[in-house]
Image (cartoon, grey):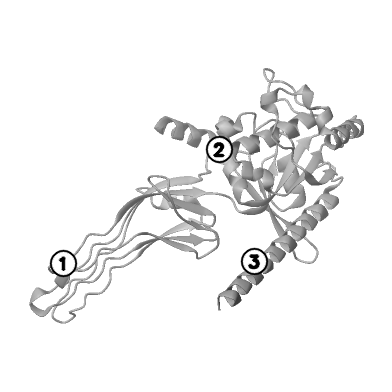
C-alpha cells in the first residue's frame, strides 16, 4: 500500500485528495480535593472548512499529521474552577468528507466555516473522578476531498475537456495533443452577462475499467458524486487509447462511459446529463454527427454491436446534445446557454419538491394537533 501511494505521488505531482491524521483531545486538569475544586476540561479537536485551503497545504504545514488539543488547567486556590484547554482546529478545504479508521462517516464539510468535532477533550478532575483528570479522546481520521461543482465533465482522455473548460471559463488547464494531460481535477467558472456564475469541474479522463480503479478510476469518479449535473464530452471521430486497445466510435464512447458510471455508483446515472460532441472542425465531422444522432435516437438498433458486458442497464437520456468545437469556438455559446437552462430547470424542480415537502409536514403537524 505504501508503494502504491508513493507511485501516485511521483506520477501525479502536487494534487492530494486524501489524508490520514492522528487527533487527540486534551487531558483534563487536576481537581483540588481539599476545597472541592474542579480541573478544567481538555480542549477539543475540530476540523474546519476554509475557502482557500488545500490538503497539500495542510500536509506541508503539518508534516507530522498530528493534532493535539491543549490540557485543561488545574484547580487551585485562586481559581477553583480550572479553565478549559485550548481547542485545536484543523484547516481543510471545502468539500471534505471525514471518516474514522473503520470507514464510518463522521461528517461532511460542504461550505466555508463548517466544522466537525473529531476528538473530545477529557473531563477535569472532580468529585466523582476522585479529583483525577480524564484523558482526551484519541482518533485516527481520514480526510477525503470530493470536488463540489455545478457541472462535472465526463469523457475519455483527449476528448477535449480541458480545451472546453478553457473556452467556457477563465481556468487555464494544461492542454496537449496526447492523452492524460489532465492529472488532477481542474475547476473553472462560466460567467454570464447578468453575473450568474456556474462552476465546472474537469476531471482526468476515464478509461475502460475505471470502476475497477484502472487509471486511478475511483480517485476521480468520486468527484462526480458532488456535481449537480454531468456534461459528457466526446470526440466526434471516436477514441483509441493506444495501439493495443480497440478503436471506439463516438457512440461506443458514450455507451462505455455510461457503463463505467453505472458500475462505480448507479446513482451517478440519475444526475441530469448533457452531451457536447466535440471537434466538429475536423474533416467529415458533419456526416459522423448525423450517424451519431441516428444512433442516439434509436440506440436499441445498434446495441447488438456490443458485447453484453459492455452494455449499461439503462442508457443516459441527454437533456441537450450540442455539437461544438473547443478549438474554433463553434457551439460554445449555445452550450453555455443549455448548461444554464438545465441547471435553472433543476433548481425549479428542487424548489417545488422542497415546498411540497414543507406543505406535507405542515399538514401532518396540523392533523396531529
Tell me if 238 is positioned left or right of 284 in this view.
Answer: left
Q: Residue furthest left?
A: 34
Q: Which residue is mark 3?
A: 357
Check the image and report above or below for 296 versus 307.
below
Q: Position of residue 160 (x, y in %)?
A: 74, 38
Label 3 vs label 2: CA separation? 34 Å
Q: Are marks 3 and 2 in contact (CB under 8 Å)?
A: no
Q: Quadrant of residue 245?
A: top right
Q: Nearer the viewer, residue 153 or 15?
A: 153
Q: Is residue 171 visible?
A: yes
Label 3 vs label 1: CA separation? 48 Å
Residue positioned 78% across, 23% down in the render: 304
> Is label 1 or label 2 in front?
1
Label annotation for residue 218: 2
Label 1 vs label 2: CA separation? 48 Å
Tell me if 190 is positioned left or right of 111 in this view.
Answer: right
Q: Quadrant of the C terminus?
A: bottom right
Q: Residues within 10 Å of mark 2 (few under 14, many from 20)?
A: some
Residue positioned 85% across, 51% down in the render: 334
Q: Which residue is mark 1?
A: 129
Tell me if 330 is positioned left or right of 227 in this view.
Answer: right
Disc 3 or 2, which lies upstream in sequence? 2
Residue positioned 49% across, 64% down in the render: 114
- Element type at mark 3: helix
Q: Residues within 10 Å of mark 3 (few under 14, many from 20)?
A: few
Amino acid at each position: 500500500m505504501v508503494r502504491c501511494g508513493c507511485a501516485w505521488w511521483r506520477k501525479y505531482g502536487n494534487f492530494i485528495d486524501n489524508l490520514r491524521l492522528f487527533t487527540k483531545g486534551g487531558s483534563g486538569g487536576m481537581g483540588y480535593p481539599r476545597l472541592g475544586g474542579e480541573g478544567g476540561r481538555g480542549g477539543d479537536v475540530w476540523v474546519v472548512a476554509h475557502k482557500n485551503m488545500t490538503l497539500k497545504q495542510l500536509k506541508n504545514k503539518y508534516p507530522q499529521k498530528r493534532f493535539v488539543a491543549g490540557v485543561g488547567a488545574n484547580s487551585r486556590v485562586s481559581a477553583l474552577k480550572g479553565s478549559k484547554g485550548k481547542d485545536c482546529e484543523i484547516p481543510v478545504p471545502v468539500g471534505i468528507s471525514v471518516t474514522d479508521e473503520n470507514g464510518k462517516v463522521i461528517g461532511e464539510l460542504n461550505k466555508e466555516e463548517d466544522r466537525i468535532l473529531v476528538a473530545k477533550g477529557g473531563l477535569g478532575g472532580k468529585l466523582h473522578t476522585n479529583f483525577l483528570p480524564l484523558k482526551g479522546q484519541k482518533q485516527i481520521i481520514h480526510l477525503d476531498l470530493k470536488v463540489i461543482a455545478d457541472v462535472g465533465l465526463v469523457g475519455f482522455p483527449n476528448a477535449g475537456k480541458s480545451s472546453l473548460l478553457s473556452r467556457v471559463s477563465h481556468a487555464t488547464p494544461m492542454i496537449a495533443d496526447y492523452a492524460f494531460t489532465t492529472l488532477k481535477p481542474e475547476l473553472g467558472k462560466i460567467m454570464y452577462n447578468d453575473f450568474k456564475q456556474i462552476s465546472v469541474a474537469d476531471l482526468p479522463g476515464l478509461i475502460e475499467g475505471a470502476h475497477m480503479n484502472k487509471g486511478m478510476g475511483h480517485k476521480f469518479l468520486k468527484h462526480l458524486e458532488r456535481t449537480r449535473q454531468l456534461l459528457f464530452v466526446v470526440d466526434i471521430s471516436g477514441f483509441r487509447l493506444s495501439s493495443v486497445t480497440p478503436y471506439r466510435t463516438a457512440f461506443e464512447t458514450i455507451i462505455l462511459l455510461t457503463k463505467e458510471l453505472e458500475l462505480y455508483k448507479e446513482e451517478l446515472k440519475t444526475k441530469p446529463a448533457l452531451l457536447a460532441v466535440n471537434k466538429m472542425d475536423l474533416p467529415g465531422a458533419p456526416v459522423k454527427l448525423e450517424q451519431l444522432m441516428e444512433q442516439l435516437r434509436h440506440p436499441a438498433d445498434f446495441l447488438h454491436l456490443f458485447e453484453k458486458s459492455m452494455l449499461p442497464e439503462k442508457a443516459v437520456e441527454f437533456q441537450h446534445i450540442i455539437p461544438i468545437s473547443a478549438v474554433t469556438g463553434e457551439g460554445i455559446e449555445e452550450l453555455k446557454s443549455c448548461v444554464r437552462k438545465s441547471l435553472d430547470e433543476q433548481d425549479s424542480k428542487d424548489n417545488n419538491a422542497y415546498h411540497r415537502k414543507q406543505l406535507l409536514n405542515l399538514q401532518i403537524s396540523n392533523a396531529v394537533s
